[in-house]
Amino acid sequence: MTSRSPVQKSTAETVKAVRRFSRSFSRRHFLRRGAAGLGVAATGPWYIKDALSSSGECRVFIWTGYFPQAFVDKFESSTGIKLRITEMASNEQLINKLKSTRGRGFDLVTPTLMRSDQWKDLDLLQAWEPELLPLDNLEPRFLAASERHWTWNYGLYHLPHLWGTEAMGYRTDLYETEYGKLSLGDLWQEDVKGKIMGRPHSMMSGIGRYLASIGEIQPFEDAYKDEETMRSIWSDITSFAIDHKEWLRLFWRDSNTQQAGLRRNGVALGQTWDGPIIAMKNAGEPVNYMAPKEGAFAWLDGFSLPTGADNIDQAYELVKACYQSDSAGLQASISGYNPTVKGASDFLSGQAKAAFHAAYPEDALEKLWWWLPEPQWYADVRAEYADKFVAA
C-alpha cells in the first residue's frame, strides 16, 4: 500500500473537516436527498432534471484548444449536457472577467496553478467536494501540486486538467537548430532579427533566465523574493528587451496569433506554447517545437468552480468525463498539450507521442522550469515592466 505524503494527509483531513461542517448546508446533498425521496433512479448522468435542477448545460471558460470538438461531441451525446464554451487567452483575462461579474457567468473555469495567490483573497471560487470525483484517476504528483497551492479555508479550489510548456517554436524551412544547441537566447541573435515573436511578460522572463544562465544578472528565481529584488532584476531585463525591440516581428496574445505568426506573418522563431505549434506540426505544416537547453517553462492548468456557478452538477459531470483515460488521451492528442490522468498515454495517437518526444528529447523533461507561485504584487510589477517594453 502506498503511503500518502504529509500534504495529501493534511488535505484529506481538511476536506473531512469541512465536509462535517458543511454537509447539512450542501446544495448537492440536498438535491441528492430530494432525488432519493422522489425515487429518482441513480443511473446515467446524475444531475436531476426537475424544478430543483439547473439547465442541463455547462458554461465553460477554458483555454483555446483544450476541449477539441471530438471531445465535446462525445461528452454531449453521452450525457445530454450542452457545453457552452468561451475560449480564454490569459489568466489576467479570466481574473478580470470574474471580478467584473462577481463570480457569475460561468460554471467552470481553468486557472493556472501558479496563480493561486492571486485568487485566494478574491472570494470568487467555491471549494470542490473531492469525494464526488474520481481523483484516484489522476497522476498523484499533479493532484499533490493542486492540493499544495490551492487548499485554503478548509477547501480545495483547483483540480488538475492539462499541463504544458512555453519554449521555442520555429519554421523548419526558415530556421535550423537541434536539441542542446537551441537556447532562449537564440531569439536575440542576428540571424533572426526582425523575425521573432513572443508574449511580452513571458518573453521577458525568458530573457531573465537567459541572462542569468550566462552570468549577466543574478538568478532569475530571486525576482520572486521581494519587490526590491524583483525591480533590480527586471530593470536589467527591460533594458535588454528595449535594446532588442527591433528583433520583434510581432507580439502574440493567444494560440491563434501564435499560429498566424508562423503560418503567414513572417516569423521564423518564437517563444511559444507547445499546443498551437504541435497541432500545426501534426497537421503537416513546416514547423517544430522544442525545449531550449535552459529548460522549457512549464505550467499546470486546472478546473475551478466560480461562486456564481448555476450548473454545478453538470460541471462535476464534465470533470468526471475529463478524468477518464480515453477522454484525457483524446484531448491531449488533438490539443497538443499533455494529460494528467493515469493511463491517458495509452490513448494518445502515434503522432502525438512522436511530437512529445521531439519536443522533449533526452533530458528535457528533467530540465522543465515550472512557473513559480505569483503573488499579486509580482504580477503588478511585471505588468508595469512589460508595458514599458511594449510601448518602447
Image (tube, rainbow, N blue to C red):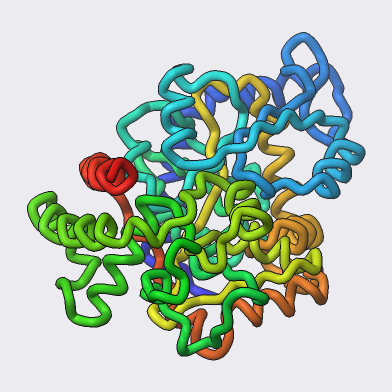
Say if residue 234 shows up in the picture: yes
Q: Where is residue 233 in the image (x, y as percent from the top left)?
A: 16, 61
Q: Nearer the viewer, residue 207 or 294?
A: 207
- Give the tally of numbered discs: 0
**Residue most toward the left?**
228
Q: Which of 124 and 350 is in front in this view?
A: 350
Q: Which of 302 and 8 is in front in this view?
A: 302
Say if residue 376 shows up in the picture: no
Q: Which of 191 and 390 is in front in this view?
A: 191
Q: Is residue 46 left or right of residue 218?
A: right
Q: Position of residue 249 (x, y in %)?
A: 48, 55
Q: Is residue 179 left or right of residue 339?
A: left
Q: In this view, does 171 lie to the left or right of 183?
A: right
Occupied quadrant, residue 388: top left
Occupied quadrant, residue 328: bottom right
Identified at 68% across, 66% down, the residue is 278
Q: Is residue 217 depicted above or below 14 in this figure?
A: below
Q: Is residue 380 left or right of residue 136?
A: left
Q: Where is residue 70 in the image (x, y as percent from the top left)?
A: 85, 49
**Residue most toward the right?**
77
Q: Where is residue 356 in the image (x, y as percent from the top left)?
A: 66, 75
Identified at 80% across, 64% down, the residue is 283
Identified at 34% across, 29% down, the residue is 122
**Residue most toward the top?**
51
User: Where's the N terminus, which quadrant?
Assistant: bottom right
User: Where's the C terminus, which quadrant?
Assistant: top left
Identified at 88% across, 29% down, the residue is 41
Q: Is residue 71 depicted above or below 87 in this figure?
A: below
Q: Is residue 362 depicted above or below 88 in this figure?
A: below
